[in-house]
Amino acid sequence: MTSHSDSFALSLVSISPAMLALAGGALAVLVLLAVALLLRGASLRREQAEEASLRAAEGEARMAELLKIQAEMQGRITAMAEVFGARQSELNQAINQRLDGMSQRVSSTITEQTKSTHENLQRLQERLAVIDAAQNNIQTLAKDVVGLQAILSNKQTRGAFGQSRMETIIADGLPMGAYAFQPTLSNGSRPDCTIRMPNDAPSLVIDAKFPLEAWNAIRDAGSPEAGKIASQQFRRDMEVHIRDISEKYLIQGETQDTAFLFVPSESIFAEIHENFEPVVQKAHRSRIVIVSPSLLMLSIQVIQAVLKDQRMRAQAHLIQGEVAILMDDLGRLDERVRKLQGHFAMAQKDIDMVVTSADKLTKRGAKIEALEFEAGDGKPARDSEPATKSVESRTGLLKLRVVDEE
């Protein structure tokens, strides 16, 4: 430190007076500048203080205005809070009412939906039960169809099926003794059925052996050529079968001149008449009638009516005798009814006379009660002894005792 000061003093001594004068002038200038700066700073501070005071006044005014606005806002907020509270309570009440109404409607709707659902489920269960029953029936029918297919695939069982259906129709339509199944004719042949005709007429023959193999071949044909071949085979089989029936079963004096060829299906019968007209014509020429189940049933009903008429003609003399006896009974009944009518007429006449006498007695009693006597009435009635009169009817069977009292 001492070394520095010494060096500074040596430097000042070495400076010339001119330099010192210049340094003094510069220092004075610097002092003036500092004073000017201080004055300017003081004025700036005064201006800043005035601006600050103005700003403070403005801030206080704004603060007062803000406080006023805040007070107004608080009042408005309070009013709005009250309004909002009232509105909220009304809204809550309205919402509660609507919720209650909606709850009731939803509850009733749910109840109705539940009831409807239960009813629908019940109906669905009933329908499912019906469907189950129908499905069981379909399964049973499918088994029957399979069995029928197995039957129709075998020639012997198929013939037994047609025979059984024909026997059922005949047994349902005719009385016992009017038909015979598998009888033996004089030539040794055995038709499927014979029906005894009235008046000792020859029997009617029915054959149920329909050739179904060729018909199934027609249905199973996959091409027109195969169908044509199967149709030709069916036509030949039908012609052979018709010829066999004509030769075996049409016996003069033993059977009718016409025989029935039973077809166990209405659809096959319709197809034969529609597509195999030559077969039908050949059957007519050979006195063979192709019949379906419905036609056989109709023929059986006609035969049944003929048999009934024949039995009635056979019993005509017995009916006449019964009618004669009935007429005798009716004659006796008519005679007895007429006698009874005469008795009733006599009784009616006696009743009329009794009514006439009663009317006279009534009039007489009225006169006596009114003390009105005529000159020819005889002695007056005594008080102690009543007058007694007897009235007898014409037949002498009815007597009336009349007592005249006062």
Image (cartoon, rainbow, N blue to C red):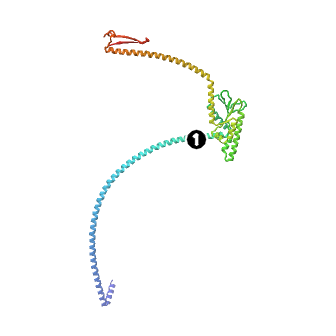
- Which is nearer the eye, 108 or 75? 108
Q: State the residue at coordinates (59%, 40%).
A: 141
Q: Quadrant of the N terminus?
A: bottom left
Return the x and y of residue 126 as percentages of the image width and height.
51, 41
Residue of label 1 = 138
Return the x and y of residue 42 as percentages of the image width and height.
27, 77
Q: Quadrant of residue 269?
A: top right
Among all residues in the image, which is located at the extreme top?
Answer: 379
Q: Is residue 325 above or below residue 130?
A: above
Q: Amino acid at mark 1?
A: Ile
Q: Quadrant of the C terminus?
A: top left
Q: Quadrant of residue 31?
A: bottom left
Q: State the residue at coordinates (61%, 29%).
A: 305
- Which is nearer the eye, 71 or 401? 401
Dot 1: few (<14), some (14–19), or many (≥20) neighbours within 10 Å? some
Q: Is residue 105 left or right of residue 183?
A: left
